[in-house]
Amino acid sequence: MKNILNKIYGGKIHTTKYKEENFKNLNSLESLYGEINEEGINSIVNYLKEKSLFNDINFLDLGCGNGKAVLHMSLYKNVKRSTGVEIYKSKIDEANNIVNLI
């Protein structure tokens, strides 16, 4: 699992200029981008496990960006489905590049 996580979280955060993606109504604050890291996902999973809430999980990440959290969560056997939703095509393209690395 660690080898796969290194591929998911390796490299730089992928960002582009979003203006070319035809979302003209978004201002700079609405297109801010942040990313959760491996440690953050592990903290969430550990908390859910401590509360006995990590069974048959359906994980949904709205604004999933590069899909790293979605891919990470998909590695757990207790996660039935891991889904990401993103409006920026460039982010989805980068997520697909990460999938191809795995």
Image (tube, helix red, strand yellow):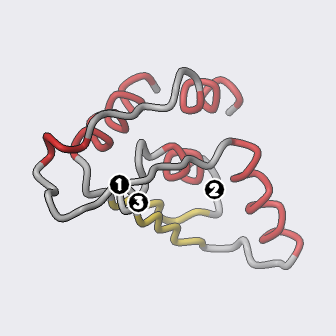
For numbered disc 2, what is the local secondary structure? loop
Mark 2 or mark 3, earlier in chain? 3
Mark 2 or mark 1, earlier in chain? 1
Q: Quadrant of residue 4?
A: top right
The numbered dot on residue 3 is none
- For residue 47, side relative to residue 41 (left or right): right
Q: Quadrant of the N terminus?
A: top right
Neighbours of disc 3 within 10 Å: few (<14), some (14-19), many (20+) = few
- For residue 65, side relative to residue 8 (left or right): left
Task: Report which residue position mark 3 lands on.
Answer: 29
Is residue 57 or residue 96 the one in the foreground? 96
For numbered disc 1, what is the local secondary structure? loop
Marks 3 & 1, CB-CB < 8 Å contact: yes
Amino acid tagged 3: Leu
Amino acid tagged 2: Lys
Task: Report which residue position mark 2 lands on.
Answer: 77
Q: Position of residue 51 (x, y in %)?
A: 85, 78
Could you tell me which residue is drawn at 74 percent across and 62 percent down?
44
Q: Position of residue 79 (x, y in %)?
A: 58, 63
* Disc 3/disc 1 C-alpha distance (Å): 4 Å
Q: Quadrant of residue 28?
A: bottom left
The numbered dot on residue 28 is 1
Is residue 85 or residue 24 the one in the foreground? 24
Q: Quadrant of residue 45?
A: bottom right
* Disc 2/disc 1 C-alpha distance (Å): 38 Å
Amino acid tagged 1: Ser
Could you tell me which residue is drawn at 52 percent across and 65 percent down?
80
